[in-house]
Amino acid sequence: MGLLTQNDARLFRGFFKEAAKLRGIPVQYSYPITVSATIYAEYNPEMSTPEDMDIIFIENPKPNTLKKIGWVSENKDDKPYIMLLPYDAKNLCTLCEIHISPIDTLSESPRVFRITKITTLLEYPDCWTCIVAPVFTTEPAKENYDQTNYNYLKSSEDPKADSTENIVFIHGNTEDVNYTYIDKGDK
């Protein structure tokens, strides 16, 4: 057991790096430098400059692989994404991000994954087994509501009628509005 911690462990880690270079995919790896939290308990890490790294990405793991890392899943639809990272990954933690560049020409932005769990399969591992989750970007929240059009009914008349007297516009001028009604009803 003592030899495994010295030269053999370094040899196995070199084997993994070579396997990841031959069979894996090249990615951009970045780790958090400082982390701040919002009032909603969401982390906003300041990430380091991306580093090139070769990893093995298992997008659809087999049940035996899941049992080895301690993930027991009865539901076949509930499988995590697994990435095998080299043992010498710098500052590896659960907020690290991995950017996979697009393979096809349809998408321009890289796929971004954030590490959620870190495990190993051996006592003296050759790589880190990381469970990752995709990071989705959304449009920023709307802060300026000045140009929106609020319609209120002035009376209890039929709102489908071709009349502009029962509509009051809070923002804007009623003379510039083009009134087209899709549902004219049965006439």
Image (tube, rainbow, N blue to C red):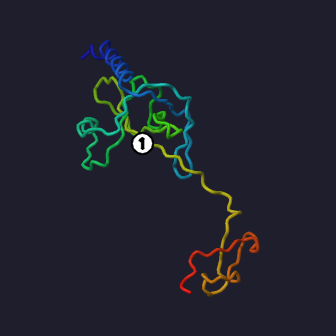
Closest to the observer, 50 or 44: 50
Examine the image and state in which quarter residue 161 appears: bottom right
Give the residue type that dot 1 points to. Ala
Q: Is residue 177 left or right of residue 142?
A: right
Let me know if residue 67 appears in the view.
yes
Examine the image and state in which quarter residue 67 appears: top left
Let me know if residue 98 appears in the view.
no
- Where residue 81 appears, as percent x and y from the top left, is 36, 40
Q: Is residue 71 left or right of residue 152?
A: left
Q: Secondary structure at mark 1?
A: strand
* Quadrant where the C terminus is found in the figure: bottom right
Circle 1 packing at 10 Å, graded few (<14), some (14-19), many (20+), is: some
- Where residue 123 appears, as percent x and y from the top left, is 28, 25
Examine the image and state in which quarter residue 171 appears: bottom right
- Write down the residue under mark 1: 133
In the depicted structure, whether residue 7 falls above or below residue 67: above
- Where residue 9 appears, as percent x and y from the top left, is 31, 17
Q: Is residue 37 left or right of residue 168?
A: left
* Quadrant where the N terminus is found in the figure: top left
- The residue positioned farthest toward the front in the image shown: 187
- Where residue 99 appears, as percent x and y from the top left, is 48, 34
In the depicted structure, whether residue 161 falls above or below residue 72: below
Closest to the observer, 38 or 158: 158
